[in-house]
Image (cartoon, rainbow, N blue to C red):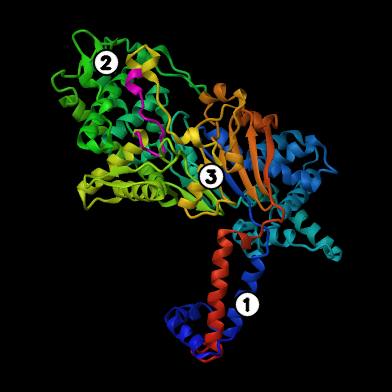
Amino acid sequence: MPYSSEDAVLDLKQELRYLKLLSKQFPTIASACTEIINLQAILNLPKSTEHFLSDIHGEYESFNHVLRNGSGNIKRKITEVFGDIMSEKEIKALATLIYYPEQKLEIIHKQEENIEEWYKITIYRLIEVSRKAAFKYTRMKVRKALPAEFAYIIEELMHRGPEEYDKEEYYSEIINSIIRVGRADEFIIAMSKLIQRLVIDRLHIVGDIFDRGPGAEKVMETLLNYHSVDIQWGNHDVLWMAAAAGSEASIATVIRICTRYANLDTIEDGYGINMLPLATFALEFYGDDECEQFKPKLENGIVCTDNDLKLIAKMHKAISIIQFKLEGEIIKRRPHFCMEDRLLLEKINYQEGTIELNGKIYVLNDNNFPTIDPMSPYQLTKEERDLIDKLKFSFLNSEKLQKHIRFLLSNGSMYLKFNSNLLYHGCIPVNEDGTFKKVKIGSSGKCYSGKAYFDRLDTLVREGYFHENNPEAKLYGMDITWYLWTGPDSPLFGKDKMTTFERYFIDEKETHKEKKSHYFKLEESEKMCRIIFKEFGLNPDTSHIINGHVPVKSKSGESPIKANGKLIVIDGGFSKAYQGTTGIAGYTLTYNSYGLLLVSHDPFESTQKAIEEEKDIHSTTMVLEKELERKRVRDTDNGKEIIAQIKDLEMLLDAYRIGLIKEQ
């Protein structure tokens, strides 16, 4: 609307500095008008698809497959296009080719008698699927996603109109030429990866990339190269973040977990951190100790010799004792963490081999503590100090680890608000009555709760990694990051304590209990969810909370959908250790223009079977919430930004038209 009143002109003059900067990008009335038209058109496109995954826990093969198949999204696209003319077997074959084009082509070359005919049919089918997948995007966005070497060819083939029958020979000749010059395989690979790219516009990882499984560094490398991803940190992630920052207790804990699951490949091969010093130390001090309670749990098909298992058990015990000592230092240094109940080394009667907990005496199942001084149980020996210094140096100087942690910091956060969804990994600390719990941070005694607590923690995590110029601030940030792993009011942990010591040294299971946060009792309450939405500035009527962290026990009848659909738990169940309890391989979530789709997955067998036998993960899709009207870009956060851009451009037009700014 043209500015005619004096007040309107005054408003423009107040924005003149910004408008002059904007005019450098759009120097004429025509260019500004063209951009407004383009942006206005984008607002009416269907909302693109978001993909939510959680609790990957180093299970690279399962994660990679779900990412490649878009939680079944690619197969759905193929069925939509070719469901009437292709058999189920043909659909599976085409889907597998799109998931694993390089590997599948090797097999096809050995099996296919008429490879040229197969090329023609397959390229045609890939083009049709890619057109379906690209439907929601502008040509410019699709163009940016195209592989450079085939960009022109793919664009020509994808954007042919239904009326262009007279150009059929032209399109056929393009395909024939691709085959004739020997580039069909490369073209099929490029098309397959383009389809993978187009079916998911934004990937959300709702925490816990690390630990248990053997491929966390491969997961991180995949995310590092993904086109659009955000991460909400989980407790296992912040543990590695603290370790990479130099937190000694976190370094010891990371190594302990890796030895517990015989998963030293992640540390040694993945991140180049030398475990020989720990092995040497363990043999020196625990050489005659069977370390029965520290025998590693073998999962994920890991196979070890008896000698390796014995050595890893000794390493496991050695680093565990060091962890307890280093944790004790933090707890004593930060009394406001309220974790004195975790100072267990001082509660041991080393002569009797017992420990007193909650007024009861328990016999320890292992009383060999060669490196603990009963008079000063948290004091590291000289050898332990030398060992932790070497390990710390390796963590701080692992180029790949530091690259991955910086990526977690630049693309991650404690929580995310995105398109009316609130994403966080664990919980929000609340009191029994559902009010937000006030948690003390720092020696000043200042308390935080709700959103303010999350925001403060987010800042402190970054200070723990980046604040090199202020050693005290960096140390506090590292301690807080460690606290997020195990602290009683950590929103990423959600329990009153972590009973690691008790599980190793006390047989009575009553001591192993970890009390969950009140949040998990109240998560079925729609009222509580509405309070949380208001706290984080979201509309309670249209918003959802998306959680990870806690595996859903589906075989016991537990539902991932809580609080009348306001809260969704999508623990991915990738970790094989949880699948016996849950009965499935967890859940993923997609959010497209039609609504929310919750997908439950059966366990993934292997990449090899997925390729050779075309065994996809069997998934069941549930329509969680269907939109009455198809969502458009204008209904998203990106749409709000585009609307603001249009308003700015309209102001620029008015400035041009009344002469405040001259066209260039």
**Residue in the image at 55% along x and 31% along y:** 573
Q: Is 498 inside the magenta-drawn segment?
A: yes
Which numbered disc covers residue 545?
3
Q: Nearer the viewer, residue 478 or 24?
A: 478
Is residue 255 shown above or below 417? above
Q: Is residue 397 visible?
A: no
Please state which of the two labelled residues, at mark 3 or mark 2, is closer to the viewer: 2
Q: Position of residue 522 (x, y in %)?
A: 50, 36
User: Quick check: marks 2 and 1 in contact, CB under 8 Å?
Assistant: no
Q: What is the crowding at mark 2: few (fewer than 14 residues within 10 Å), some, or many (at least 20)?
A: few
| Residue linked to disc 1 | 34
Is residue 659 shown above or below 23? below
The magenta-colored residue range is 488-503
Whole-angstrom CA distance, mark 3 to mark 2, is: 41 Å
Please state which of the two labelled residues, at mark 3 or mark 1, is closer to the viewer: 3
Q: Which badge, 3 or 2, comes first in the chain's sequence?
A: 2
| Residue linked to disc 2 | 359
Q: Amino acid at mark 2?
A: Gly
Q: Amino acid at mark 1?
A: Thr
Quadrant including the N terminus: bottom right
**Residue in the image at 76% along x and 52% along y:** 128
SS at circle 1: helix
